[in-house]
Image (spheres, coloured by chain):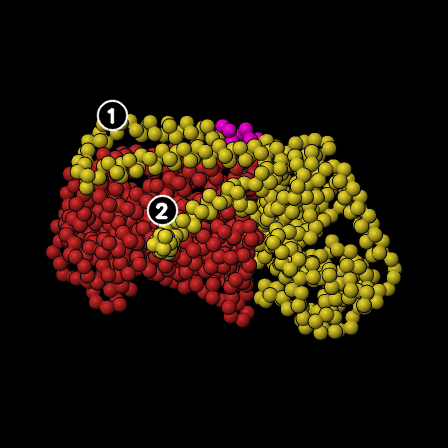
Chain colours: A blue, B red, C yellow
Amino acid sequence: MRIPEYQTPELRRKNVRLAWGLAGLALFFLITSFPFWSGIFRIVGTQALQ
Amino acid sequence: MSTTTLTHDEAHHHEAPKGWKRWLFSTNHKDIGTLYLLFALVMLFLGGASAMLIRVELFMPGIQMLDPDLYNNLVTNHALIMIFGAVMPAAAGLANWMIPMMIGAPDMALPRMNNLSFWVLPAAATMLILSFVVPFFPGGGTQINTGWTLYPPLSVQVGMSMDFLIFAIHLLGISSVLASINIIVTLLNMRAPGMTLMKMPMFCWTWLVTAFLLILVVPVLAGGVTMLLFDRHFGTSFFDAAGGGDPVLFQHLFWFFGHPEVYILLLPSIGVLSHVIPAFSRKPLFGYKSMVGAMLAVATIGMVVWAHHQYTIGMSLGAVTYFMIGTILISIPVGLMIFNFIATMWRGAMTFETPMLFAVGIVLMFTFGGLSGVMLAVVPADMQYHDSMFVVAHFHYVLMPGAVFGLFAGVFYWLPKWTGHMYDEKLGKLFFWVNVISFNITFFPQHFLGLAGMPRRIVDYNMIFTEFNVVSSIGAMVFGLSHLLFLYIVIKTMRGGKKAEKRAWEGAKGLEWELDSPPAFHTWTVAPQVK
Amino acid sequence: MQNQIKQTNRSLLGINGVLATILLLATAGASAEYGLNFPEPAANVAQEIYNIHMMTMGIATVLLVIVFAIVFYSLYFHRKSRGFEADQEFHNSWFGNWSWVIVPVMVLGVDLTIAGKADAVLKKVWDVPKEENIMDVKVTGHQWWWEFDYLDHDIKVESRYVPKEESGDLYLREVDNRLVLPTGVKIRFLHTSADVLHAFWVPELAVKKDAIPGYVTETWAELNREGVFRGQCAELCGTWHARMPIVVESVSQEKFAAWVGEQKAIKVAAAAEASTDKTWSMDELMAKGKPLYETKCGACHQATGLGLPPAFPALKGSALTVGPIAGHLDIVLNGKEGTAMQPWNSLNDLEIAAIVTYERNAWDNNTGDVVQPADVKQAR
């Protein structure tokens, strides 16, 4: 395995940055699939009513 | 442009490494593409074998050879192996091989992650197979009898094999998310100069959309099965009404993944068709822009109509009306795609080599499957169709032509490019006819079974359902075995045959056909200039 | 003549043969007993659903014919082998420029036709009538039998599949106790489940609804003809999912009233028998326990007591059935969490006493224990 030599450091940084961004998107969807937010809504809702 | 001039000289230095290290440590998109395709081929036969066992069991009324739980486990495995093991890796294999060659890039953007995303797959497959094998050993618990939908509370009852399956799904998910990230980065950052997004080959567009869909929905499935694992072992009650949870929540999470998954399987094949049909009609793709638009529309609407898989769970009238209308509206972009394919053939100069035969078969049979899909979308009527054999017939008419035949078309279309040999055209055509005819014999009668009242996923049935099940099972045996012919053709082509030219097909367009057949180990080390 | 026969034989051997079989089946199907379409509806809403089904199928068939016709025309005429030159400018014609509007508008028209019709029927299916005299039937799915509670009449019917030896041709479509319903009365079904998901499906009533543990879903029907209608559980519910038939017997209101009277009498007699202070002998309990065990427990633990390990443990010689009586009673009354074993506390004391006594003495278990209804009462 070698570091792909066809990528300039600049392109490589660009690629890695985009990849992390996409991974963040995936992580966001993973976390929001847990229904904790329904509880948060309920807490916010009840507090707003008081 | 300095990029390519810098690396140009070095690129000549290393040819393909030898031995097992070439494959295990590979960062080369062509080698990884080959690995993906071979893996998918193996899984195709595993999934096919389980499907044939299912049909043998259903050949006649009565329990012939499979215990009910073993039968249900085969039903589960058939779906999971075909979807996650065969179709998705095969599409990823095509993407790995073709995308860099099509966009004039030297390799994928993140080659080492590419290696990782493939090598996670064999581990996942091992886990999946273990989930099937473990119950045969003493103390191994029960078979997974839930179907691939894994609905709780049934999936909470299953023994430890369910835990193996959950981890297998996690691994498969990691693999596809990593592969998707790689493909998106490649497509957005590595295109040859001059290739704007709207000049990108259609296959690349379909994969760009597919990869985004995967990133959005696979984590949701991962979340769902993780909660299932927690419910099973850590005393949570996400899906247990007794503890304040809701069994239906899992269904929503599953189908939030599961419905876009259908488009994930379908779109790469639509991409393949967008190359095959123009090539053999000898005229450009009709409606490139509307194709891109239709695809984006399918992906967007497809994300928000998942609950049409659960019309019977007792949703409110407003909710079912919304999901019904949303689902029916999907027929607009899908109809436009089909129309564009037909318009591409219209007034073309067609020849019918194997890829084109598959393409025409897809246009016809996918239309059929799509129309029965509209029937299923209609809520009142779906009160009848739901969970009957009609649904089984419908989704096989969508997924076999829509996904698998598209992959076959792609393999036959690009096999000369990959191997440098033309495949045996006569055998290819024979494979097409046997495959397509037996496919229809297998699945067409299942529509009638569903309407007559046969539920899906039953191991034994009343004798009124005998006739059509016999026909279906006979078709399935021929259909299953016909894939051995496919294997033979592929092996034969790999070993030799008529030399393929650079442009293997008269009407083929695109950068990949300007490379040698087979291409050098490293291609496009100097990026081409796209006009 | 001889030649002809040979030829037919040869063609029957190949793919043609299979195709011919299909054609034969398709043509024969119209008159034969196996259906090509839904059975004749037995409720008004079911009839409307049937009509929607026929309409969408009609539209789908017409569209399919049009698409096939266009494709086959093109396949025949626009071939290179016929010398057809590809029209390279086709996608730049006015049609090429505007088809992305024309096609979606046409498809939208079809969609709206279907959705409009469906929406009207959907409202009828979904809106359970809110009437005073509606008859409520609670349908509870169990692994693997149905429980029907006639809430207005205080009757409970347990419905299980009938083994092949007794049901013959109706195997997997016949039950021991049918769901008897009157015609001309609006019936509301309240669906729930005791364990995993099930789904109630009788095609003639056209209602399918999931039974979800901990939740109640509802559907309704008004039967418009008498008859026997057969359906099955439609949601995968584990090992014996195939063995959950539903048989609806639709009868006139007079017959229904008579049936209700009969059921009530049986119930009163059973309750009277169970509440006597009589001490039961081993033989009496064994005689009562055997049929009870075989209907209620036999599906999982088998008539032989050997079970179907690992899912369903054996009772023959197991630590449970030959161990302390208290533990045995506890499992039977309260079930075992995380497994298919459900609580059986809805059975009366005598029934439980009979079953437990039977389990402790059948299949060479021979513990000699006699469990009395009073013991069960104490254990509750």
Query: x, y percentage for residue B401?
Result: 36, 46
Res B5 label? none
Q: Main secondary structure of the magenta part?
A: helix
The amino acid marked with disc number 1 is Trp
Res C94 label? 1
Q: Is residue B352 visible?
A: yes
Measured in 3D between alpha carbons, the distance from the residue under mark 2 to the one under mark 1, in whole angstroms, is 32 Å
Dot 2 falls on a residue whose secondary structure is helix
Dot 1 falls on a residue whose secondary structure is helix
Residue C116 higher or lower than A7, as above or below: above
Q: Which residue is mark 2?
A: B401
The amino acid marked with disc number 2 is Pro
Relative to the observer, which residue lies in front, B241 or C43? C43
In the image: residue C22, left or right of residue B509 = right
Count of marks placed on residues = 2
In the image: residue B208, left or right of residue B505 = right
